[in-house]
Amino acid sequence: MNNRRRQILKELNLLPTWYFRSDTFHINQSSLPAPSKNEDITSSFTHKENLGQSKEIDQLKLAVSHCTACPLSKTRTHTVFGTGDKNASWLFVGEGPGAREDETGEPFVGQAGKLLDQMLFAIQLNRRHMIYITNIVKCRPPNNRNPSTYEAAQCEPFLTQQIALIKPKIIIALGKVAAQSLLKCDNSISSLRGKIHDYSGIPLIVTYHPAYLLRSLPEKAKAWRDLCFARSVMGSLLQNPSPFDNTSRST
């Protein structure tokens, strides 16, 4: 472990107990969802720039910026479409923009974003390469409240198309709102963690939202375990990019 990673883990209060090891989890291949019938999973591991796809994402971003489908459009400063690698293998989905995000038009730029960056670095990832970050809703709910079911439903077609264009290999749902919205359930986050869920043939892992972790420091270790689990799932996909049975497995 290099010194910077050690320092990050120390800041996250995860040393000396926690560190990433590739063999932390054994992933049963049968626990991974079968890929969508519309997607060739073998081709999805190539990351050449697709100009047509990039243009479609830019057009979708423009459409989002003009959206007035729900009342959030009346109070926003900017829409927050998402940011990152348009050919990302990893897609992180939060609940909605906060005040800083509304000002800048970029997701996760406040303290929660800083914590997310630290946790990504700790598992050898960064938001500039193979990562895309977005939210369930693209406009800030007033007073940073959770987005309503209606607001999430109005934004869902944008998110669905966004995911279809990016074609991530794995989705990380950050927090209860994102998890329940993506999985169409009302389960508690504790019951959803530690399992491989299926989102249209894409493995989905649930963990805590970074903003919650800032308020609940003891839960950082659980979130760290979730990210290590997700890293192991991705490793299994890279080693064996073939169709899998559509089941889930607790860890």
Image: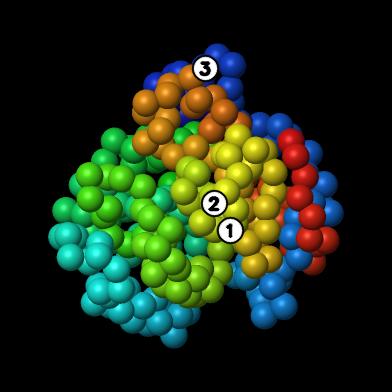
The mark closer to the camera, 3 or 2, is 2
The amino acid marked with disc number 3 is Leu
Instruction: State the quadrant of the C terminus.
Output: top right
Secondary structure category for the residue under label 1: loop
Q: Which mark is residue 242?
A: none
Query: Mark 1 = which residue?
Result: 184
Query: Mark 2 = which residue?
Result: 180
At 60% across and 53% down in the image, what residue appears?
A: 185
Q: Residue 15 carries which label?
A: 3
Q: Where is residue 9 in the image (x, y as percent from the top left)?
A: 47, 24
Quadrant hosting residue 152: bottom left
In the picture, measured across the screen, residue 50 lies left or right of residue 199, that is left
At 33% across and 81% down in the image, what residue appears?
A: 59
In the picture, measured across the screen, residue 80 lies left or right of residue 200, that is left
Badges 1 and 3: C-beta atoms under 8 Å apart?
A: no
Colour mode of the rendering: rainbow
Q: Residue furthest bottom?
A: 52
Q: Position of residue 225 (x, y in %)?
A: 60, 31
Whether residue 5 appears in this view of the structure is yes
144 over 75 or under it: above or below: above
Whether residue 242 appears in this view of the structure is no
Nearer to us in this view, 209 or 106: 209
